[in-house]
Image: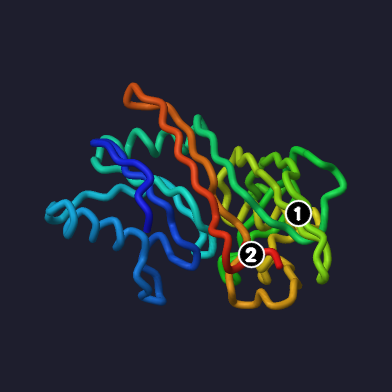
Amino acid sequence: MKILFEDKHVIAVEKPQNCPIQRDQTKQRCLMDMVIDYFEFECGISNPYIGLVHRLDRHTGGVVVFAKTEQATRTLNAIFVSHFITKRYLARVEGRPIEGKALLVDYLTVDSKLNKTNIDVYTNPSAKKAKLSYIITQVYETEQGVLSDLSINLFTGRQHQIRAQMSHLGHPVLGDEKYGSKWPNTAHVSMALWATELKFDTFGKHYHFESKPPESGIWLIK
C-alpha cells in the first residue's frame, strides 16, 4: 500500500491489484487492514476510525480514499452519491473501438448469484442508468492482436460498470474473463483496469489524487 495524501479529514492510498477493499470470504488481508496497521503501528493510534466511502473491485488497482472521522464519512458519502466528483480510470481493452472517443449510456442489472452485471433495457424497473465517456490514448499492435488504452471518465458508479459496458461494446478489459476477455496468458493473473484520478472539493479544499499502474504484470506489453 502506498500513501498518496493525508490530512485530518482523509487519507488517500494506492490500492494494489488483487487486494480486496474489505475482508471477504477468502479472509485475505484487505486494504482496510493495511490502513489500520499504518495508523496503529506507524502513527501509534489505537483503534483508529476508518470510514469507507467508495470501493474498487478486487482486481482493480489505484486511488482509494478513506475518511478519518464520522463527519468526514458523511460529507464524502454525500459527494460520491451526488456525483460532484471526477473519477478517471485507465482500461486496456482488447481490439480498437471504432470511435476514438465516445459517450456510453447503458442500463444495468446485477445477477447476484453470478456476481455479474448485465446490460438491460431502460424499461426494466430494476435497471440502473450507467454513463461513462472514453478516449483512446494508445494503441498497441502485438503478435496476439490489437490492444487499446482508454482514458475513462466515470459519471456513475455501478457495480462492474466499466467491465460490463466495454464488454457490451465488443472490447472487454484485458484479462477480464468474466466479461469475455479471451487474450492468451492472462488467465487468473489480473485485469488491466486502474483508478488513475480522483478530484473533489470539500472542507474548503480542492483534493486531486493521481496514480499510475506498474509497468509489470498485466500492464507489461511485450
The numbered dot on residue 5 is: none
| Relative image position of residue 136 (x, y in whole percent) | 75, 44
For the residue carrying disc 1, how many other residues have a C-alpha within 10 Å: few (<14), some (14-19), or many (20+)? many
Outermost residue toward the top in this view: 204
Tell me the amino acid under the disc marked 1.
Answer: Ser
**Residue 72 appears left or right of 150:** left
**Residue 85 appears left or right of 111:** left
- Where does the C terminus fall, quadrant-wise? bottom right
Q: Decide which of tag 1 and tag 2 comes sooner along the chain.
A: 1
Tell me the amino acid under the disc marked 2.
Answer: Leu
Q: Residue at x 53, y 64 (%)?
A: 59
Camera-side mark, 1 or 2: 2
Q: Residue at x 45, y 31 (%)?
A: 200
| Relative image position of residue 133 (x, y in whole percent) | 70, 39
Residue 182 appearing in the image: yes
Residue that label 2 marks: 220
Structural distance between the alpha carbons of marks 1 and 2: 13 Å
In this figure, what is the number of numbered marks? 2
Residue 123 appearing in the image: no
Is 170 situated above or below 105?
Answer: below
Q: Give the secondary structure at mark 1.
A: strand
Q: Give the secondary structure at mark 2.
A: loop
Q: Give 160 or 89, whichever is nearer the viewer.
A: 89
Q: Give 199 or 114, whichever is nearer the viewer.
A: 199
State which quadrant residue 166 falls in.
Answer: bottom right
- Where does the N terminus fall, quadrant-wise? bottom left
Residue that label 1 marks: 148
For the residue carrying disc 2, how many other residues have a C-alpha within 10 Å: few (<14), some (14-19), or many (20+)? few
Q: Which residue is drawn at 80% across and 65% down?
A: 142
| Relative image position of residue 110 (x, y in whole percent) | 61, 59
State which quadrant residue 22 falls in.
Answer: bottom left
**Residue 38 appears left or right of 129:** left
